[in-house]
Image (cartoon, rainbow, N blue to C red):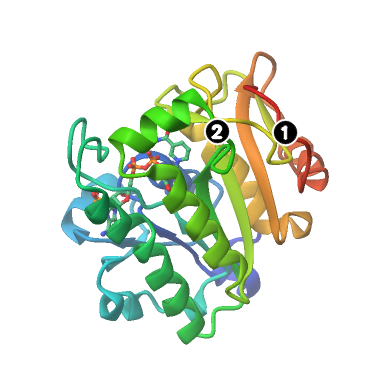
Amino acid sequence: MLTKDTGGPAMIPYCIVGGTRGTGMQIARQLVERGAPVRCIARDPVKARNLLPAGVDIRQGDVTDPASLRRAEFGECRAIFFAVDFTGGFGGRGFFKPARQIRTVTYEGLVNTVEAAREAAFTGRFMLLSGMGSELPSCTGRLLNAIKGNLQRNQRDRDAYLRNSGLDWSIGRGAVLTNGPGGQADIRITPPVHRLSMLCRVARPDFARALIVAADAPVASRKVFDVFNEPGIPPTDEALTAQLKHAGSGTPKYGC
Ligand SMILES: NC(=O)c1ccc[n+]([C@@H]2O[C@H](COP(=O)([O-])OP(=O)(O)OC[C@H]3O[C@@H](n4cnc5c(N)ncnc54)[C@H](OP(=O)(O)O)[C@@H]3O)[C@@H](O)[C@H]2O)c1
């Protein structure tokens, strides 16, 4: 990656919506470690300032408030990572909150962000963080649909909205996310063929890494792919890019 002093692509920021927690915060931190300029859209900029590395350009924005997203100036960005999930409810992750409230943030928030990007003449890649197997029946999916406001319907609807938006996009479908340290196992990127299963997991830092590589990989344009950990050695960025070449479509199967 070019240094900040050279001008050109290195000066064009990556933008993260939902970077104050979880995978979005991992994306922000890893991009800064790679020397990339980062812009973060956060509901509470003071909180974001305390959580994110120095140098991150923090703009106030709430995905349920379309006017606030104009401050993001998405047109200046090389990629947008939509890492938003509902905050609140049991465990802080939306469990047992009304389905209507969850959809306002996770689906309508995506719609508002895509429309803000289009309005700003954004020409980079829109990276959507989604969940594995959203159109495939599974016990884990049924459980989460029941306690998290029809989670998989929201995921399917926002995937479809982005795919039809006219923007360049990639959709990374994580397995069940964990707060493990990352860098401890292999990262598998495959076609989107897996059902959601508690047995199939990915550490948030590893999910973040796969998405960062995909944001700049021409082969990941307009592709949907599954991401999960398997026992093994952490792959290089080149190995992740090679896996993205084969992501696209495939036959559904159970688990990892
Ligand atoms: N959890 C899983 O097992 C799983 C599995 C596969 C895929 N995914 C997907 O992966 C993504 C990341 O999940 P995660 O669990 O790592 O994220 P997370 O920890 O739940 O973080 C969610 C982020 O969204 C932000 N946010 C919430 N409401 C917002 C709003 N109205 N406007 C702007 N930002 C808002 C939060 O900011 P505040 O600090 O302001 O609340 C926070 O930064 C999600 O899209 C999720 O659907 C999750």
Q: Which x, y percent locates residue 166?
A: 63, 77
Please name the residue that numbered disc 1 is placed on. 236
Q: Does residue 213 appear in the picture of this structure?
A: yes
Q: Quadrant of the C terminus?
A: top right
- Residue for point 65% across, 61% down: 2
Label 1 C-beta lies within 8 Å of the nearest ligand 1 atom: no
**Disc 2 packing (10 Å; few <14; some 14–19; many ≥20):** few
Residue 18 or residue 89, whichever sits in front: 89
Please name the residue that numbered disc 2 is placed on. 137
Marked residue nearer the N-terminal end (1 or 2): 2
The picture quadrant where one finds residue 185 is: top right
Q: Are marks 1 and 2 in contact (CB under 8 Å)?
A: no
Q: Is residue 5 left or right of residue 54?
A: right
Q: Which x, y percent locates residue 242?
A: 82, 41
Q: Which x, y percent locates residue 229?
A: 61, 24
Residue 112 or residue 206, whichever sits in front: 112
Give the SS element for disc 2. Answer: loop
The image shows residue 78, relative to residue 172, as above or below, that is below
- Residue for point 51% across, 81% down: 118
Q: Amino acid at mark 2?
A: Pro
The picture quadrant where one finds residue 56 is: bottom left
Q: Amino acid at mark 1?
A: Thr
The image shows residue 198, relative to residue 164, as above or below, that is above
Q: Is residue 116 left or right of residue 75?
A: left
| Alpha carbons under labels 1 and 2: distance apart | 33 Å
Q: Quadrant of the N terminus?
A: bottom right
Give the SS element for disc 1. Answer: loop
Q: Does residue 4 appear in the picture of this structure?
A: no
- Residue for point 67% across, 44% down: 225
**Disc 1 packing (10 Å; few <14; some 14–19; many ≥20):** few
Q: Nearer the viewer, mark 1 or mark 2?
A: 2
Q: Is residue 7 left or right of residue 106?
A: right
